[in-house]
Amino acid sequence: MDDDYNRTTGLNQSAHASVELHPTRVRWHIMALVMMTTAVATLGRLDLGVLGKYIQDEFHFSPETMGLIFSAFMFGYHPFQIPGGWSADRFGPRKVLAFTISFWAVFTAAITIIPRDPITHWLGLVWAFVVFRFLIGAGESATSPAATRVVASWMGTMRRGVGVSFHIIGIGVGGAFTPVFITWVALRYGWRVGFWISSLLGILIALGWWFYSTDRPEQHPRVNAAELALIGLGGTKAIPGIVRKDIPRKHTPWARIFSSVSVWGMLLSYFCQGYMPYIYMTWFFIYLERVRHLPMMKAGIWGSVPFVAIVVLAPLGGWFSDLAVAKFGKRRGRQSTVWVGMGCSAILIWVGSNTVNNTLAILMLAAALGLNYFALPSWWATCIDLTPTHAGSLSGLMNMCGGAWAAPIATAYIATHFGWTQALDFAALLTAMGGLLWIFVDASGNLEEAPVQSAAG
C-alpha cells in the first residue's frame, strides 16, 4: 500500500513538474493592461483636442484662451509626477493606478456640467475649464511612472525596451481611435457625450487594476515558477496574497540621482522630446481643419494617422533598443536608438511642415511622430536601467520635466504671430536638440549600487 501511495504521489509530482515547465503568460496580460491604461488615458487627454472646436465655437474662446485650457492639463500633470512615481514605488502600482484613474475619470465627467457647476459661478467660464483640466492632469500624472514600475517588476532585464513599448503603444492606440470616434460621437450626440465615454472607460480600467493585477509577479495566483524564472525572480513559486517581506524598503537615492550627469542629460532631452507630441495631442486636429482646410470627418480620419504610426514604430523602437543594448551595451544601445529616432523625426517635421501637398505633408508629419515614439522607449528603459527598484520615482521626475506643458501655448503664440510652418519648424529644432543631448546619457550605470558615473566616463 505504501508503494502504491509513493507511486501515485510520484506521478502527481511528475505531472505537476511537467506543467511547471511551461511558463504561464500573466506578464503579457499585465502588459496588455498597461497598454489599455495608456490608451484610455490618451483618449481622456486627446478628447479636448478633438472637441475643442465645439467648445471654442460655443463659448467664443480665442486661440490663446484655448491654448491656456489645453495647457492646464499639463500644469496639473507635471508637478504630480514625482509624488505619483514615488507612491507607486512605496505602495505598489496596483492601488495607485486604481485610485488615480478613478480620480481623473470623475473630473472628466464633471466637465460636462460646465457652465452650470459652482466653479463657473465662482471663477468664470474659462477658469472652470482650466480647473477641471488641471485636476484631470493631476489624476493622470501617476499613469506613466506607475506603468514603468509595473514594467520593472514584471519584465526581465533584457526586455525592458519591449516592456515600456506597451505603455507607448497604448498612446498610439488611444490616439488613433480618439479623433475618428470622438468626432463621430460629437457630430451625432454632442461634445459632452465624448467626455462621458472617456470617463466610463477610465472607471472600467481602474476596476481592471484593482481586481486582476498585483504589484509583483510572485503575488499573482496565476503565475507559476517557470514564468517567475523567465522574469528573473529565481523561479520562486507564486503564493497568492503573500507579500515578499524579505525585500527591505530602501529610500530613493535622490542625492545620486540629482548629482548624475546622465540624469540631467536625460531630463533636458526629455523636455525637448515631449514638446512635439503634444502639438498632435492638442492643435493637430484644428491644424488639419483650419490650416490644411480638411472637412471635419476627414480631419478626424487623417488626425488618427500619426497615432497609427506610433502603434507601428513604438514597439519596433523598443525591440531595436533591446537589440542594440545586447550588441553594443546599454550606453551605446540606448543612445543609438534615440539618435536614429529623433534625428529622422526632426527632418520629417521640417520637410512636412513646408510641403504644400496635404497628403504627402500629413504622411511625413505622421511618420515624424512615429519616429519620435520609436526613440521614446529608450528614455523609460533607461529609468529602469539606472534605478531598478526606484524606477517609478525617477520616471516621475523625468516625466515632470517633459516639454508638453509648453507646446500648446508656444504653438498658439508662434502660429498666431509668425505662421503654422514656423511653429512646426520650432518643434523640429527642439526634436533635434533632444537627440543631441543623449551624448551625456550613460544607461550602463546603476545609481542604487555604484558610485555616480559621468556620461563621459
Image (cartoon, rainbow, N blue to C red):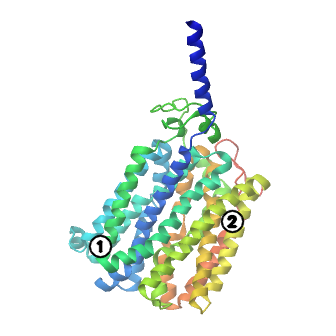
Please, what secondary structure does the residue beneath circle 2 have?
Answer: helix
Question: Which residue has dot 1 on it?
Answer: 192
Estimate how packed mark 1 is, as few (under 14), some (14 to 19) or many (20 or more) residues with alpha carbons within 10 Å.
many
Which x, y percent locates residue 274?
Answer: 56, 69
- Looking at the image, residue 358 sits to the left or right of residue 203; the answer is right
Count of numbered labels shown in the rendering: 2
| Mark 1 or 2, closer to the camera | 1
Looking at the image, can residue 179 be seen?
yes
Q: What residue type is labelled 1?
A: Arg
Residue occupied by mark 2: 338
Q: Give the quadrant of the C terminus.
A: bottom right
401 is higher (above) or lower (below) than 129: above
Residue at 60% in and 81% down:
363
In the image, residue 452 sits, relative to residue 345, either above or below, namely above
User: In x, y percent, where is residue 375?
Assistant: 65, 65
Q: Residues within 10 Å of mark 2 (few under 14, many from 20)?
A: many
Residue 267 higher or lower than 453, as above or below:
below
Q: Quadrant of the N terminus?
A: top right
Three-letter amino acid code of the residue under disc 2: Val
**Is residue 392 in view from this perspective?**
no
The quarter of the displayed image where residue 197 is located = bottom left
Residue 177 placed where, x, y %?
Answer: 46, 70
Q: Identify the element where label 1 is drawn.
A: helix
- Give residue 389's position: percent from left, percent from top: 58, 43
Tell me which numbered mark, 1 or 2, is placed earlier along the sequence.
1
The answer to whether marks 1 and 2 mark residues whose Cβ atoms lie closer than 8 Å is: no
CA separation in Å, label 1 and label 2: 39 Å
